[in-house]
Amino acid sequence: MANTEDLPPSVVSIAEYLAMKAKGYDNHLKWNEQAMFKADLMNVRRRWYGVAPDAFAGKLRSEGMREQNIVELVDWLKKAQAGRRLVPDRSYRDFVFNPPPEGLDSGRGHQSRDW
């Protein structure tokens, strides 16, 4: 299992945010937070490049998120890393989580064939 300490700070803050929102709804992640996550996976691929799904799942688990939501989020992460396209709800299509991703070294970003 991957170490959650290896996660970038922006990914850690997103995991904490999603878990906090789920706790507010009887530990169920609402559709809009799911759409936000999908949109960020598509709009900021470089943030998620190299994020170990096991480490992300471990962070969500440590924040108290229920297993059903963890499986769903990790499945979307794996699909995005495999180059698949996720379609968030139209109202969140351009959504990007703050803070911005780390390591904006070249400005080129990553393309699906880099995954």
Image (tube, grey):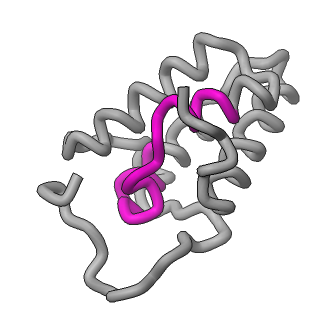
Q: In which quarter of the image is the N terminus?
A: top right
**x, y percentage for residue 67?**
64, 12
Q: Is residue 47 above or below residue 2?
A: below
Q: Is residue 104 above or below residue 70?
A: below
**x, y percentage for residue 88?**
40, 43
Q: Residue at x 35, y 54 (%)?
A: 42
Q: Which residue is drawn at 26% across and 83% down?
A: 108
The answer to which of 108 and 5 lies nearer the viewer is 5
Q: Is 65 placed left or right of 78 in the picture?
A: right
Q: Residue at x 40, y 26 (%)?
A: 75
Q: In which quarter of the image is residue 46?
A: bottom left
User: Which residue ends up furthest to the left in the rendered image?
Assistant: 113
Q: Is residue 103 above or below residue 21?
A: below
Which segment did they paint magenta?
Answer: 38-59
Q: Is 99 placed left or right of 35 in the picture?
A: right
**x, y percentage for residue 66?**
71, 15
Q: Residue at x 54, y 70 (%)?
A: 101
**x, y percentage for residue 114?**
19, 59
Inspect the magenta stretch and tell me whether residue 51 lies in it. yes
Q: In this view, does 62 lie above or below 90?
A: above
Q: Secondary structure of the magenta portion, mostly?
A: helix
